[in-house]
Amino acid sequence: MKIDFEAAVQFLRESDNFLLLTHRNPDGDAVGSLWALCRALRSIGKRVTFRLAGRVAENMLFAAEQPDDSFEPQCIVSVDLAEAHLLGEELFPVYGDRIDLNIDHHASNTFFAKKTLLNGNAAAAAVLVYQLYAPLGATLDKKAAEQLYIGVSTDTGCFRYHNTDADCLRTAAALVEAGVDNGEINRIIFETKSKAYVQFESLALNSMRMHFDGKCAVISLTQEMYAKTGVDESEIHMISALPRQIEGVLVGVTIKEKENGLCRVSLRTNEPVDASSIAKIFGGGGHKLAAGCDLNGGLRTATADLLKAIEATLKEYNLL
Ligand SMILES: [Mn+2]
C-alpha cells in the first residue's frame, strides 16, 4: 500500500524496536539514508538496529552508525529498495515478505512492503529521509547531515546528473547549514581513488568496445581483473559512469562477471533512451537514465543478449 508522508511519520512515531535494511552492496544513498534514519529514530528515543549485505565503501565509514544487538526487532523498515530480492541472497529469504515500511525513490518500485513511502521523482532516498526529520521531531546534527549528504551527493554524481532537482539542492543547502563540510566530503568521496582502483580502471577502459555506430559502449569486468588488481568491490561501481561519458554514446553498459556465470549489468543512458526499460527486459529495473539487471550464462552470452536488446531499443527510437 502506498502511503503519504504524514502516514509514514505517524507509523514511525507509533512503532519501536526497529530493524533497518537496504539493498545488497549498499551504495552511498543506501547507507547514507539507512544511517540517517537510524540516527533520526534514536534521537527521538527509539531503539534501532540494522543489517547491511556487503561491504560499505571505506571512504564513507566516517559517518557510520553502529548496530544494536540488545533487543528483539519488531518493526522492519527498508530504504532505497526497489524490489525485495535486492536485499540479497542472505537477507531476502528472511525478510523479503516481512518489511513493514519501505522508503524509496525508484519509479520501478514493486510495492513489496506492507507500506511504501515512494517519491519516484526524488533524486535520492536520502532526500525523503531528510524530509522526515522535521515532522518526526528528530535532531539534525552534523553527523546526521553528513550521512544525508553522502546519500544525496552520491546518487546525483555530486550534483551533476539530470536527477539533480531543486528539492535535492535545497536539501543539500540545509545539510551544509547543519554543518556539513561539503568540499571535504566531496574530496574524500569523489576526488580520491585507491591505487588498486586506478589500475583496475585502466584495465576496464582497455576492455571497452563500441557498438552501433558508437551509440553504445560496453565495459566488461572479469574475475581476472579483480584478482590482478585486488580492487575493493565497493569501489567498482565508479566504473559504471565511464562508458556514457564518451561523446555520442547513448547507452553505456558495464558488465560485471560474478560467480557461476552470473553477470551483473549497469546501464547508464543519455536522453532519450530509457535505461530501466532495457533492464526490465531481463527482470531488472531502476531509473530512466540509470538501471541494472542480472543475466546468466557467462560474459559472452550475456553480452550478446544485451546487445540484441540494445539494438532493438535503439531501432525503436529510430536512432539506428
Ligand atoms: Mn538511491
Image (cartoon, rainbow, N blue to C red):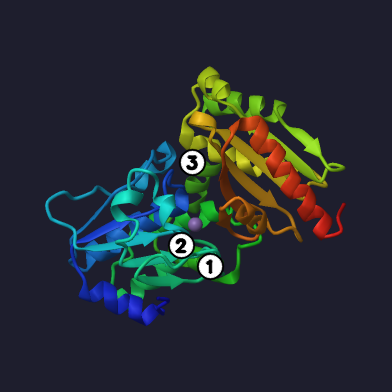
The reply to whether dot 1 and dot 2 touch (C-beta < 8 Å) is: yes
Q: CA distance from mark 2 to mark 3?
A: 21 Å
Look at label 1 and name its amino acid: Ala
Category of crowding for the residue at label 3, using alpha-carbon neighbours closer than 10 angstroms: few (below 14), some (14–19), many (at least 20): few
Is the CB atom of the residue marked by disc 2 within 8 angstroms of ligand 1's nearest atom?
A: yes
Q: Residue at x 75, y 40 (%)?
A: 217
Please tell me the numbered disc located at residue 125.
Answer: 2
Task: Classify the position of the N terminus by image quarter.
Answer: bottom left
Category of crowding for the residue at label 1, using alpha-carbon neighbours closer than 10 angstroms: few (below 14), some (14–19), many (at least 20): many
The residue where tag 1 is placed is 122
**Residue 200 image-quadrant placement:** top right
Category of crowding for the residue at label 2, using alpha-carbon neighbours closer than 10 angstroms: few (below 14), some (14–19), many (at least 20): many
x then y, percent, for residue 205: 69, 30
Q: Residue at x 78, y 52 (%)?
A: 312
**On screen, 45 above or below 144?**
below
Disc 3 on helix, strand or loop? helix
Extreme residue in the top direction: 228
Q: CA distance from mark 3 to mark 1?
A: 24 Å
x then y, percent, for residue 199: 60, 23
Among the two numbered marks 2 and 3 on one chain, the one whose residue lies closer to the N terminus? 2
**On screen, 177 above or below 11?**
above
Look at label 2 and name its amino acid: Ala
The residue where tag 3 is placed is 188
Q: CA distance from mark 1 to mark 2?
A: 7 Å
Residue 51 makes an appearance in the image: yes
- In the picture provided, is 156 more to the left or to the right than 12? right
